[in-house]
Image: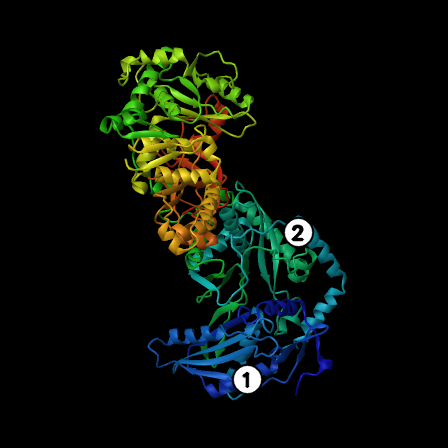
Amino acid sequence: MSVQEDDRRPLSGAQEGLWFAQRLASGSAAYNTGEYVEIHGPVDTALFETALRRTVAEADTFALRFTHTPDGPRCAPDAPADWPLHRVDVSAAADPSAAAEEWIRRDLATPVDIESGPLFSHALLTLAPDRYIWFLRAHHILLDGYSYKLVARRLADTYTALATGEEPAPATFEPVGRLQEEEAAYLASERHARDRAHWAERLAGLPEPVRLAERTAAPVAPFLRRTVDLTPAEAEALSAAAARAGVSRTDLLVAAVAAYLHRMTGADDLVLGLATMSRLGSAALRTPGTASDVLPLRVRTEAGAPFGELLRTVAAELRDLRRHQQYRGEFLRRDLGLLGGGRRLHGPVLNIVPFTEDLVFAGHPSTSHHLSGGAVEDLQISVRPGADPAGLWLAFDANPAVYDETELGLHLQRFLLLLRQLADAAPETPLADANLLLPGEHPEDTPAPEHQVTTTLTRRFEEQAARAPRRTAVTCEGASVSYADLNADANRLARLLVEHGAGPGRMVALALPRGIRLITALLAVLKTGAGYLPLDTRHPEQRLRLVLEDVGPVVTVTDDAHAGRLPAVSAPVVVLGAPDTDRALAERGADDLTDADRTGPTGPDDIAYVIHTSGSTGRPKGVPVPHANVARLFEASERHFGFGEDDVWTLFHSYAFDFSVWEIWGALLHGGRLVVVPYEVSRSPREFLRLLRAEGVTVLNQTPSAFEQLMRADAEDAPASAADAAEAPDGLRLRYVIFGGEALRPERLRPWADRHGLDSPVLVNMYGITETTVHVTHHRVTRADLDDPRRASVIGRPLDDLRVHVLDAARRPVPPGVTGEMYVSGPGVAPGYLDRPELTEERFLPDPFGRPGSRMYRTGDLEGGHAYGKLE
């Protein structure tokens, strides 16, 4: 008998949602469901097949056929086909259990055509003469989880009756059409209107649901699974904790998931998905079919809220949800405009199954195993009675296109850690007190090494000058100066500045163009023991005035071209290039200064420079940075680079930008050569590329946006063919290209990598800020960074002497991979803000993970979601 057109009827809400989902996932097994029952005793296989076929015939959902019509999808009962019972004997296998599970996994992954079928499969697997498995796979459009229990119970009762020679009692199954009839009656009732109004109010202003992964993907099969069995004692501890708070254990489990999502994401407005049976009334409870649903459970909480408050909130929300659970998730998606829009109604799904399966087959006990409840879009957490009914079985199922094996395993471990803490916690315990760090992840487990700098930048420079006095130190536009001459010129100017009041604890302003004279003046200031204040005369006059007022330099060093661009100041001005200045310098000694030549002794804790952060509007924040901070920067990064005297660096950036500190001292502390890039050349990528070739630059420091312009110029100069390339090499000698100052988008580097490779030069991404002395982290760009969008903007690992803490709002460490605010601790952290105590107290904080008296800097960047990227 075939399906008659008059028998066709519209699908129920649950069936329709699954119909369209399967059509979108054509050829996928994502919507297969499956369970198996292991029977601990011998089985009469012929009698079992008789019992199974009778049970399938009694549950008319197995006879449904689905078709597409001009009026939409329809279903109708059909005479069940002569479906096969797969007989599988794995008793001879080395590991019968593993062989049976492998067969089951393969069958569960069978793609389904929802119109042509077959939509279900049964198997009886023999593992031993006294050990059998009955396995049922069905498309979710036929059965939900509750229906599996109805079918399994009827099969066990029928087989037991037949085995004892009795006729089984009549089946109490209702026809599957009863579910559609009840739904139609509900849709026409006042209750439907009340439920709709309830959900409209409850979901008003619904946020984009937070998840534990940034990625999204359509469901695929098979999904990943990680499971654990909680002992009866652990389950009882959860029940006792719930009782202390006056709620049920189910309430506690849901609250634990909400607490975990809150702690892992920092979100205060959470939307979980809660699996519901969606069966009201005795008839629905006797009907095999599909009716289950996933509804949004909206929970609001705060980091400082006590766990007992969250428990009570969740318990109240669950009561409301159950009262209005007949209003299906499909209706809510339609009401909220989420159908086909790619937006999710909820985050992770929680499925708590309270009932146990105590099935007996002709006197032999059995154990039920849940395999799949259908598609997993993101993450599903299931809780069921365990093999010991007094315990609990916990499963984390995940979409493998969203999570990997390691991520899923770590989530399960962290959730168990939280769950066990909540079992022992008093109701008033704040959520923020829960620890989610696994062994080895706490900052105190990996203290920073001791690091002490005992010298100054100028002494180290003087050592280089003594070691190789004739080596070229700086070049600019065809002019050059040796280490010896640069040192001598700086010594003369330093003596003149000392006479104008420069010395330890004081500041000297510099307003000079790029050139050798700028490097000479900078060195001279530091030789006096003073720090330098860089002034970029292209900045607005108001900013320059604020900067000068903030620092109060004792003297300003400039030239004729820039002196007129500065706000009026009361401090003396030394104009380089002026005749009287040249005469004064010629009269000063060129030998290195001693403490007797200065106003006081100098040391590594003296301020080397003050650089002001913030934009060109508002009050700038002056960051004083000592010599020791800069010296240790190069010591800590030495193993990553191995800079040396053969390296050629560029001063590309304004000396009022802290990237210049890395450029200047990277060259001079290692005996290398510093190429000062004229401002006009720095604005022309093509001219800058020519300079890199002509000067043989080996170390290039760039913001990503500047380098993208350079890449375009490089591509335009690329030879047209391989033969041309052999005849006209590009002339670049770069060893390193070091990025900083902005977010790096690695995929944009692919054209450069395709042309030059990733080994010469090596591309390095470094994250840092002025307050932590230029660079904090290091990451060598790899081909995986270029090809995998999930690895975009990786900022790497901290330098050896620094620590990066990623903390939540309560300044507690978050687990690796979780978004939190970044804090930097270690010897690179500046002393604070110049004359801004209120900001210093807000940003420079005691380091609770470091040695006594140590501090950390609050960056304001959100690791995992901030502008610069992710730590490794």
Q: Position of residue 663 (x, y in %)?
A: 38, 33
- Name the amino acid type tagged 1: Trp
Q: Is residue 611 left or right of residue 640?
A: right
The answer to whether residue 828 shows anywhere in this view is no
- Helix, strand or loop at label 2? It is loop
User: Which labelled disc corresponds to residue 791?
Assistant: none
Mark 2 and mark 1: span between their CA atoms?
45 Å
Q: Judging from the image, what secondary structure is the residue with disc 1 in? A: loop
Residue 667, image x, y percentages: 33, 33
Label 2 belongs to which residue?
203
Say few, some or many: other residues with alpha carbon within 10 Å of mark 1 (under 14 / 14 to 19 / 20 or more).
few
The one of 256 and 797 positioned closer to us in this rendering: 797
Q: Quadrant of residue 353?
A: bottom right
Q: Which residue is the site of mark 1?
A: 83
Residue pictured at 43% horizontal, 82% vertical: 88
Q: Is residue 521 left or right of residue 286?
A: left
